[in-house]
Amino acid sequence: MVGHNTHTLAVGKLQHKIEEARRLHHEADVVIIGAGILGCAVAVALGNQGRSVILLEKSLKEPDRIVGELLQPGGVAALEKLGLRECLEEIDAVKVYGYDVIYYGEEVRIPYPANAVDGDDEVSVEKSRTDEMRGMKRKRPEGRSFHHGRFIRRLREKAMQNTNVTVVEATATELVRCSYTGKILGVEATVQGQPDSFFGDLTIIADGYASKFRKEFRTDLPIARSKFWALELIDVPLPMPNHGHVILGDGAPVLLYQIGTHETRALIDIPTNTPTALPAAGGAKAHLRNVVLPSLPPAVRPAFAAALDRDRLRSMPNSFLPPTTNRTPGLIILGDALNMRHPLTGGGMTVAFNDAVLLSALLSPSTIPSLSDTPAVLAQMRKFHWQRKNLTSVINILAQALYSLFAANDSQLKALQMGCFRYFKLGGNCVDGPVGLLAGIIRKPFVLFYHFFAVALYAIWIYATSGGVSKFPVRVVGSVGVFWKALRGR
Ligand SMILES: Cc1cc2nc3c(=O)[nH]c(=O)nc-3n(C[C@H](O)[C@H](O)[C@H](O)COP(=O)(O)OP(=O)(O)OC[C@H]3O[C@@H](n4cnc5c(N)ncnc54)[C@H](O)[C@@H]3O)c2cc1C
Ligand SMILES: *[C@@H]1O[C@H](CO)[C@@H](O)[C@H](O)[C@H]1NC(C)=O
């Protein structure tokens, strides 16, 4: 008994010293820049493994943003693995069972596929059909949509409650490098207007889409071909409650999903240089009123018009940025700072949470006793780059491909777009596959490849059987090839 008590005391003392090292001396195993989606998740995951973590955030106020509001089932599953599922509670989150795609007024429901239990399981046609017949007995995967700021507040609370994590309101200003080895030793920051610094065996950059720090490590810039403009609609009757809505027509896609009991987010994609949204034509507001409003389901229009009159319009660039392998000793870049895809498919948070799961597994203390073992950490980062690909390449390619298709404005891509919608209408595996990929629950790039070509062939078949002759099918095949090439490797 005595021995046990002495041991507990010793551990308690050690913990206290480690906490003091963070608080007074600003020293930890890991320093993380940015307490957003990725930063909070990684801080908790590493803290749970007994690492000492400092988490820096420039503003601890509840954020008010138009991003990260729909979490796919694959993201919910990853959140659960991280022990953070509770963060979806008490924020008035809304359950999401799938999508409702509305194509020129015609609707198709795309539910998340049942029986896709874990990330590595593929949805088989046979099983999903039997599940349909069994009705609602089997639990289907669920996503969640919510106010981003409330979710972030819950994630930050979890980080603050973890005894191995110290959260500091600080703006990181510059990385600290060892001039001999080039290793990153930590970061300089401003804390309450005063310069300060923080040191760790590992520094993690998670400062989001406009990352100040990634520029030092890569020369390519994110590519944005469009922006999402946002409105918040109040008490709007959606065609299909508890579903994400994708509205397709002549223009670029519009998304609608509930983010609370009374609030619905509308995200309207406006490609750069859209003539009807140019300043001369009255800008984005005029475009929303004159072009987008009339294209919406009639039941949605009054709330949309009211929001247009009431709200300040906000927008965010829809960026694409392929990931790179981290080769800098002492440093890891993650989240939007590392890799972005068009937000049409709501994949960013799912990627971030899955990356947090994978990273903490690869850096677990049983494999990497000390994070100061730089060669061992770098070797794990090479594994990280390849192991995350099965999930992220699927999410990234699908996001870019669907966006190109849904925002199509030339006749060949329009034919593919129609083929895609008709393909969804076939139901069964034709929806289970694509939506399983989108949801982050199917991780097989081949499944994406398969459906991609199935859609293309279906589009050609529809065209051929609808009396189309001439060289059109050949041109469609050609455009598919071009399309696929443009997307490969993303
Ligand atoms: C319009 C739009 C809609 C989206 N919708 C969805 C969606 O529905 N579902 C989905 O899964 N994804 C969505 N995404 C993507 C998703 O928002 C991101 O992938 C996700 O937020 C990335 O997390 P992150 O932690 O890398 O960055 P962030 O969540 O942006 O966090 C970065 C944090 O770093 C802090 N920070 C920045 N600089 C510093 C500094 N110098 N010092 C200290 N702190 C700093 C910031 O304050 C912030 O808290 C959307 C994106 C866009 C653009
Ligand atoms: C914090 O780290 C210690 C080891 O240093 C570990 O025993 C403990 O479980 C960790 N605490 C939490 C909340 O994970």
Image: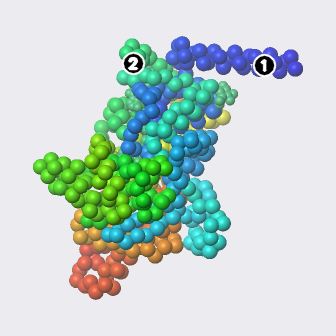
Crowding at dot 2, Cα within 10 Å, few <14 / some 14-19 / many 20+, comes out as some
Residue 442, placed above or below residue 132: above
- Provide the secondary structure element on which disc 1 rests: helix
Query: Could you tell me residue 324's position as x and y percent?
Result: 40, 42
**Towards the viewer: 144 or 259:** 259
Residue at 42% x, 59% y is 237
Residue 70, placed above or below residue 416: above
Q: Is mark 2 within 8 Å of ligand 1?
A: no
Whichever of labels 1 and 2 marks the residue nearer the N terminus, that label is 1
Q: Label 1 is placed on what type of residue?
A: His
Query: Could you tell me residue 112's position as x and y percent?
Result: 53, 62
Residue at 27% x, 77% y is 474
Query: Where's the N terminus, which quadrant?
Result: top right
Q: Quadrant of residue 294?
A: bottom left
Q: Nearer the viewer, mark 1 or mark 2?
A: 2
Between marks 1 and 2, how big is the CA–CA gap? 39 Å
Name the mark on residue 243: none
User: Which residue lies under the disc numbered 1?
Assistant: 7
Callouts 1 and 2 close, C-beta under 8 Å: no
Would you say 138 lies left or right of 285 here?
right
Residue at 39% x, 74% y is 422
Q: Label 2 is placed on what type of residue?
A: Thr
**Towards the viewer: 5 or 377:** 5
Q: Is residue 45 visible?
A: yes
- Provide the secondary structure element on which disc 2 rests: strand
User: Which residue lies under the disc numbered 2?
Assistant: 190
Crowding at dot 1, Cα within 10 Å, few <14 / some 14-19 / many 20+, comes out as few
Q: Quadrant of residue 158?
A: top right
